Image (tube, grey):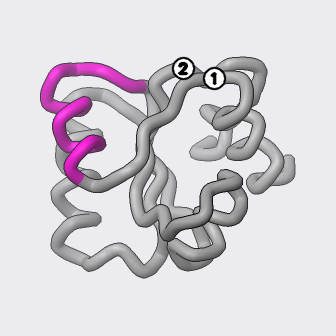
Amino acid sequence: MDTNKEIRRAVDTGKVSFGYKTCQKNLLHGEGEMIIVSNNLPKNDKEVLQHLAKTEGKKFFEYPENGLTLGSVCGKPFVVSAMIVLDAGKSSVLELTK
């Protein structure tokens, strides 16, 4: 499975939100299906999101590239350090963690 294509398909056909604070807020409200973080997200922030995802029973995936590359994959003109998949749409992005 091509990780980049599935993330892009989720952005195009599903519903995703970007940003550390947005991810945190959605997790605390029990929303979303999966968290995707870039490999250059600060360690403490990553651990917080990972813990919240685990306690809420959500999936967690660390993207192997930096936030600039993840933003490019998502078709955004900015760095994406963290994103939450609220609805996967037609993508199989939720299978990345398996």
Q: What secondary structure do most residues of the magenta stretch adopt?
A: helix
Of the residues under marks 1 and 2, which one precedes in the sequence? 1
Query: Which amino acid is tagged 1?
Result: Gly
x and y, in percent, of residue 41 in the image? 35, 74
Query: Which amino acid is tagged 2?
Result: Asp
The furthest residue to the front: 77
In-image side of 51 versus 73 (left or right): left
How far apart are labels 1 and 2 at the CA level? 5 Å
Residue 87 image label: 2
Label 1: how many residues lie within 10 Å, few (<14), some (14-19) or many (20+)? some
Location of the C terminus by quadrant is top right
Quadrant hosting residue 63: bottom right
Of residue 54 and residue 13, the one placed in the foreground of this image is: 13
Is residue 65 shown above or below 22? below
Residue 14 image label: 1
Q: Which residues are magenta?
A: 21-32
